[in-house]
Amino acid sequence: MKKQKYYSLEPIKKTGAPYRLLIGEKANGKSYAVKTEIITNAWNDTEHKFILLRRFELETKQNNINAYFQDPPKEKIIEITGGECDGIVAFQGRIYLTKWNEKKQKAEKMRHIGYYMALTSEQHYASGAFPDVSTIVFEEFVSRTGYLPNEPKKLQYFISTIARHREIVIYLIGNSISRVCPYFNEWQLTNIPKQKQGTIEIYKQKTNDGTIDIAVEFCANIGYKNKMFFGTHAAAIVTGTWEVDTYPHLQGNIDRDYEKLYTVAIKAKNFTFLATFLLANDTGLPVWYVTPKTTPIQKNTRLITDVACIDDIYVTCGFRSLCPEEKIMFDYLFRPDGVCFSDNLTGTDFIQCLKYLRNNAY
């Protein structure tokens, strides 16, 4: 039987980047690799503790943290600690390596190696000092259910509390759920939607004292085999390709079967789409047809965006219509039967950008 390959941290560690984003399929070993790394570092040096960061308080319940550290197994903990410890336990915001006491029939705390915290409580930690922490691990930073308001800014404030005047390592671990993510946009990680699996790309962000590197790894597919998964999301689970939903596609030929009435460009979260309002020749029914826009936006193009603009009358932040007819057409974008797409990936990206524009534009 062919031996299963798992993810290795070595390539991204060699970049030396303080920010390390690991994106890819479920169960490829990226979380296991990071956990093994931080536990080993904390065991070898008491000044290299870590923080396990989750988004919500609910995710930091003691039983959830204990479940997270079921991997690595007992045998790995024994190997890391030379037999001095054989387990891990979470207790009152701290994480400890433990040793089972046969006589007392309980696990005894042997060494404090880390902390667990929630990003929602970022401000509560602001007055604390954590000089013994060298690594932050933010799990599931790519969300299927939503993000905190101004989440990238909250994370920066949290990091500033922990790092103070030091440079530390931040691992952001996420599954390839959605290409529309506030971190990709806020940190100008513009090539993530097009990045190939098995590659690492480095972005340089300007800081007050120079630049800092952000390394993004779209983890290689490990050849994960499991026949349990099916349907439109099976590929994302098994191969790590971006998760997509199923959306309507245009029926017939756009030039032969439809009349083109209106065209707008829509830009949000580093995505740009071309939306064409069509009228079907046979039924007379209107529909928007949305495709990725791959060419530059020309001057005087009608543009809907997430950035305020006062210099161009053709550009509006959000769906602020310029005339009553345009408002009627825009309403169709929010109807289930009012829009179709060139492909499912475009539909998945567009619907998330549409929700963002509707909720955040002013």
Image (tube, helix red, strand yellow):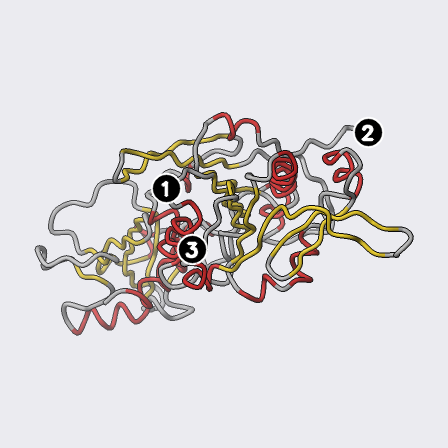
Q: CA distance from mark 1 to mark 2?
A: 51 Å
Disc nearest the viewer among 3 and 2: 2
Which quadrant would residue 322 be assigned to in this image?
bottom left
Q: Is residue 116 above or below residue 359?
A: above
The three-letter amino acid code for the residue at tag 3 is Gly
Please name the residue that numbered disc 1 is placed on.
165
Residue 245 visible in the current orientation: yes
The numbered disc on residue 1 is: 2
Q: Residue at x 35, y 62 (%)?
A: 356
Label 1 vs 2, first from the N-terminus: 2
Which quarter of the rendered picture does the N terminus lie within?
top right
Report x, y in % for residue 344.
Answer: 47, 52
Q: Is residue 28 visible?
A: no
Residue 23, relative to residue 314: is it above or below?
A: above
For numbered disc 1, what is the local secondary structure?
loop
Where is residue 114? Give x, y as percent. 59, 48
Q: Residues within 10 Å of mark 1 (few under 14, many from 20)?
A: few
Q: In front: 151, or 105?
A: 105
* Residue beneath the point at 64% across and 52% down: 95
Within-10-Å neighbours for mark 3: few <14, some 14–19, many 20+: many
- In the rendered view, does 325 fall on the left or right side of 343? left
Picture mark count: 3
Q: Which numbered disc, 1 or 2, marks the residue closer to the eye?
A: 1
Q: Amino acid at mark 2?
A: Met
Q: Residues within 10 Å of mark 2 (few under 14, many from 20)?
A: few
Point out which mark residue 128 bears: none
Residue placed at 24% from the left, 64% from the top?
318
What residue is disc 3 on?
A: 347
Dot placed on the residue nearer the N-terminal end, 1 or 3: 1
Q: Are marks 3 and 2 in contact (CB under 8 Å)?
A: no
Q: Earlier in the sequence, mark 3 or mark 2?
A: 2
User: Which amino acid lies under the numbered mark 1 shown in the image of this protein?
Assistant: His
